[in-house]
Each structure stands twice: as C-alpha cells, then as structure tokens.
Amino acid sequence: RVRPYRRRVAPRSGLEMVLSKALRAATRGVSTSAGARMALPALTAAVPKPSMMSAIFGGSAGPAMPPMDQPVPGLAIPDPPAAPAAAPVTNITTLSNGAKIASEDTPGASIAVGMYVSSGSKWETPHVSGASHLLERMAWRATANRTAFRVTREAEVIGANLLASASREQMAYTVDCLRTNLPEAVELLTDAVMNQKLTDHEVANAAAALKKEMTELAENPAHLIMEAAHSVAFTGGLGAPLVATPASLSRLDGDHLAHFVQATYTAPRVVLAAAGVDHAELVSVAEPLLSTLAPGPGVGAAPTTYVGGDYRVSTDSPLTNIILAFEFKGGWRDQKASTAMTVLNTLMGGGGSFSAGGPGKGMYSRLYNRVLNRHAWAQNCTSFHSVFDDTGVIGISGVADGPHAGDMVAVMARELAAVANGKIEAKELDRAKAATVSSILMNLESRAVVAEDIGRQILTYGERKSPAEFIAAINALTPAEISAVAAEALKSNPTLCMVGDLTAAPRFEQVKALF
C-alpha cells in the first residue's frame, strides 16, 4: 500500500506562537468589512483601533492625526526669523605679519571657513613641478600636532566637511560645520595648512595613487586637452603644468613639498575667510594661530607671456575635440573688461547636442541657436574662459564628427568674429545680463561660495567688492563694450588644440588666416 503523504510541521517556538496570536488580533483590529462597521452602535464613538505594531509589541494606538493639509490642533508654530535690516558686510582685519582675516556674518546655523593662499603651479620650478597637485592630495593628513587618524576623527566629531583644491594661482582649504564649532574648525584648519608633516612615506603613498590616476587619464588625451591649451598658450609661470606627470611624481618627496610650502605659504599671501560667523569671535580665535606665519612676500613667479600656438594628438576616436582660444589681457584685475568678458561668455553659451535645452541650460544662447541647432555633426560647442589675476584665455571648445573637424573650426571662427564685429542684438544682451546676475545671486546663497568669494577676491583685489557693485557694472554694459572685448582678444595669436580624428583637421596657418 502507498501511504498518503503527510507534510510534517515543525513545532513552533513560544515567540512564534505569541506573534501568531498578536497578528491575528491585529488583523481583527484593523478589519474594515461592512459587517464590522454596521455592528457599531450608531450613537457610540468609534474607539481607535490598535495598529499591527502596537498589537505585537504592546502599547496603545496614538491619537488620531488630521490630514497633512490641516494644522495639528494645539501645536504652536513659532514665528519665522526676522529678516536682517541690512545686507551683511564684509569685515577685514590685517594682522601685524600681513595675514588677513575676513568674514561676513550671514544668518544661519552653519558656517564655512577656509584658508586661501597665493600659491600654485605658477610658482613651481622644474624640480618641484607637480607640487601643487600633490599638495592637494596631501591635504588633511598628518600634522606636527595630529596624526592623520586624529584629523579625520576630530572632523567627524564636529560633523565637518573638509575640502582642498589646487589651481595655477591659488590653493584653497575649506571646512563646513555648525556655527557652535567655530573654534574647533579654525584650529583644525590652521593646523592642517600651516603644520603639514609631509612625511616621506605619506607623500610616496599619495604620489603612487596619483601616478596611477594620471597614467589612466593619459590614455585618453581628450581628458587633458584643457591642460594642453594652457601649456600652448603661455610661457613662464602660467605655462607650467598644473596636472602632475608620472615623471614629476617620481621625483617629489616630503622635502620638496616642505620647501615649496615654506617658500609660498607666507603671511601676506594668506587669507582666512569665513561666512556665517561673528567677526570679533573669528579674530579672537584665529589671530593667535595665524600670528606664527612667517612674514615676507615669499618666492616670486616666473614672468608669464601669452604666445599661442598649435597642439594636436591623433587617436582612434571617431570624434575630434577642439579648443580655439585667444588672449584676454588684463585678467580679473581689469574689472571693467573682465565684467564684459563674463557677460560675453554667458551670451555665447552653448552646450552639448544631447539634452542641452531648457531655460538656463544654454537653449537661447548664440552657440546653441547658431551651431548646435543647425549642424548635426556638432556634438558639443561651448564658450569658456580661463582667467587669472593679470591675463587669461577666452574662446570656444567643441566636439565634432571627425570628417567635419575643419567645418567645426570654421564655425567657431565665424561666431567669434560675429560678436567682435558688433553683431549683437539688444534682446540677447539683456538676456545674457539677466542670466549673469541670476548666476551671481544664486551662487552667493551658499555660505561655502560666499567664503570662497571673500578669500579669492582679497587675494586678487586686496578687498572684497560687493555683489551690488558687480551687478551695477553688468547692467551698465553696452553692446559696443562686449564687442570690444572680443575684438581685442582676436588680435592675439590663436591657441588651437585638437585631439582625436585629425584626417580633416585644418592646418594652423589656415586657422590663423581666418582672423
């Protein structure tokens, strides 16, 4: 005989039995059947039914809450904070050794504080080439007073966000945290910048990681085309590479970095800037710490000269990456010209051929309307600028299908010549002005941006110019002033960089003849 199959059920534990009973009770408690509703007396108030979780773990159901679009009864809503009567001002204190402390007391619970230093690849000599890039990676490591673990741990305790960045003319170290942690943040920041230990083994580890990253990056030259543009455009300080090469990383050690820091991190070249803090409190905390910085101007940079030129690398890519740039004389310190240049950059605009549209994303800019909308072979066409204290480059970067590389260069040249010849409509200039002002005000809503703006402006101008001053200068611009900036730039020798499919790339002499 075949015995019938019987499923064997494992005995349940005591906890399972309790949960099972609780689940059944909860299920009964949340029943919404018509019979259950009709069983309630018409004049009897419904008792709140226990939730499933309260049935399992005990406790009673909470009070019934109103819908989310109605106020909670009995809940006192505090009055919103009063708006300040006047816009916050920037306070600057210069110490006896030349270091500057600057702040703006913007309302709020969080703060941003940073140290900004006139140091970068512009001051590098050949034997310390790549030092600024490596110092960026060495930030927030061991100091003379803290181990790397302690630096990280103290930042975690105060909930701080630590950042560092290197550029050709400035180094930046920033901390974001709550206002109540200002003393701890300033002490940690100054120690990490002024007392870097730079031990050989830490430098070697950072250099090895950076070398691997740069080796992988070099496999696609298009990623480094902007770096190549600076090397071609300038000789001297600004022509020195910012991105460290594997060869330079093999030479650098702790002594090289320490010597570079000692030569460039001097008091007159340092600004401690903060947003969201009381200036008197900031000075009381930072002055004893910054007073130990060495006075003096520090090492000088090699003179920079704009020369322009040609750079091209052939790869197996079906696309051609192109940069066409020209000299912008005066740099940021020529405030009138730099303001016009900024509006010109917004007016030209541009973007990518895919998902580039939409208000504020370049849809109404000249390069979007006149290039990307008309030529299917144009993958990207964007106006750019790379400006420094006393000089810079402005131009257009683009990506095109390889067979149309020559067409892309011709279109870039045509668009630059058009604005230089005064072909600017009042409507598009007004739109560019409004977009520039909007960008300024929107960015300054961030305390981190405010602190950075304070620090970098003081390094460049020696003071902090108010947003109202820049906005007034923008609104006063005329089409003739915009065209004059473009026309002056086109008088310089072109900087032409191309990477990718070069089968249809024009010769440098042909491009130069277009202007």
Image (cartoon, rainbow, N blue to C red):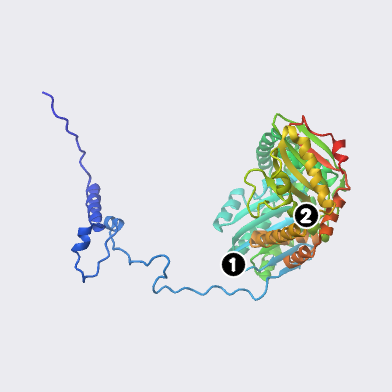
| Quarter of the rendering occupied by the N terminus | top left
- On residue 344, which mark appears? 2
Given the image, on which type of amino acid does mark 1 rest? Gly
Q: Residue at x 76, y 64 (%)?
A: 475
Task: Locate residue 131: give its quadrant.
Answer: top right
Q: Gap between marks 1 and 2, in whole Å?
A: 35 Å
The crowding category of the residue bearing disc 1, from other C-alpha atoms within 10 Å (few below 14, some 14 to 19, many at least 20), is few
Label 1 secondary element: loop
Give the residue number, with chain letter if any, for mark 1. Answer: 108
The earlier-in-sequence mark between 1 and 2 is: 1
Q: State whether residue 255 is above or below residue 314.
A: below
Q: Residue at x 22, y 62 (%)?
A: 37
Q: Position of residue 92 (x, y in %)?
A: 74, 67
Task: Locate residue 430: give its quadrant.
Answer: bottom right
Q: Taking the image as drawn, is residue 186 in sight?
A: no
Q: Position of residue 258 (x, y in %)?
A: 75, 47
Label 2 secondary element: helix
Task: Locate residue 512: give its quadrant.
Answer: top right
